[in-house]
Amino acid sequence: MKKMAHDLTPDVLNDRCPSRAVLNHVTSRWGVLILIALQDGTLRFSALRRRIGGVSERMLAQSLRLLEDDGFVRRTAHPVVPPHVDYDLTPLGYEVAAKVHALASLIEGNLGQIIAQRKT
Amino acid sequence: MKKMAHDLTPDVLNDRCPSRAVLNHVTSRWGVLILIALQDGTLRFSALRRRIGGVSERMLAQSLRLLEDDGFVRRTAHPVVPPHVDYDLTPLGYEVAAKVHALASLIEGNLGQIIAQRKT
DNA sequence: ACGGAAGTACACACATTTTTGTAAGTATGA
DNA sequence: TCATACTTACAAAAATGTGTGTACTTCCGT
């Protein structure tokens, strides 16, 4: 028995592979920025919102939950009023964030070039 | 003269920074996959479309143009009929693709864990 | 001291915007 | 007839924004 119906090794190029969804969470508009922001340490919801320019409460909450469900972000809620919730990266989340950050830095570092040759 | 009105160093966390747009092109649903697919070498439009599961002609063309404008992908059209167009990565595109690929591989490699702990 | 305003971490309903898909068209060779 | 590499118009789907509510606490002014 060697032949299986569907492939067992994850492949993002494959339409039906579940890795696609996870990749999308990580590379989503706000997901990327959340991971980068949390690299510097724990942040609470409101601080994260201030750190990431342009994000709405709705999208921040939504994106955080996806990353939490995937196991990249840890949520710690303190049972106090007014509410206090801390967010930080899991070990795996840290690895992912490092890759994302490397990508963002590369782009930031070459932004001049990129924009310069655009109008060519 | 030390104080400038707006910051000159790119920062993706800043709402108004142009690096945001470039990052979005690269991390877009199809942009990521195009870069990964082109890492293995030159591909023509139709081959790329077959390689990337689930992409429509429309989105492939659109995403390719964005990456081309940003200088990550090079387009080479041969003046023949029927049309023949080759796509490959620029040096900068190659660097970006490597980072993206590293990210995708990390996710693929940990997909088991990720899915396993989800239902917890 | 007392009323008022702002901050907190969201959820929810609703509106708008953005993204993506679909189908059709093109000129021609195999 | 099918494949090629797109473009364009139209339609559907998905993402995102906006405003409201919550149950309090702290800070502010008077």
Image: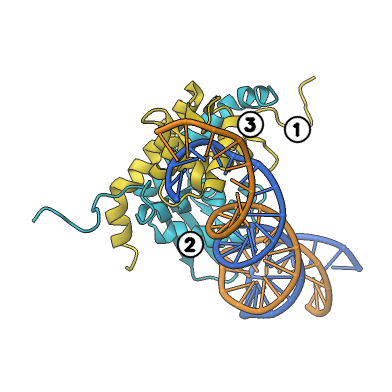
Chain colours: A cyan, B yellow, C orange, D blue
Asked if A81 appears above or below A5 in the picture, the reply is below
Question: Disc 1: which chain?
Answer: B
- Residue B99 locus on image (x, y percent): 42, 33
Q: Dot 1 corresponds to which residue?
A: B6
Q: Dot 3 corresponds to which residue?
A: B10
Name the one closer to the observer, B30 or A19: B30
Same chain under badges 2 and 1? The reply is no
Query: As drawn, is A6 to the left or to the right of D9?
Result: left
Label 3 Cα crowd, 10 Å radius (few <14 / some 14-19 / many 20+): many
- Residue B54 locus on image (x, y percent): 44, 52
Q: Dot 2 corresponds to which residue?
A: A65
Name the one closer to the observer, A88 or A20: A20
Visible residue check, residue B106 = yes
Label 1 Cα crowd, 10 Å radius (few <14 / some 14-19 / many 20+): few
Name the one closer to the observer, D15 or B54: B54
Quadrant of the rendering where the N terminus of chain B is positioned: top right
Q: Secondary structure at mark 2?
A: helix
Q: Residue at x 68, y 22 (%)?
A: A120
Q: Secondary structure at mark 3?
A: loop
For marks 3 and 2, give the CA distance.
28 Å
Task: State if disc 2 and disc 3 touch (CB < 8 Å).
Answer: no
Q: Identify the residue at the far top of this view.
A: B1
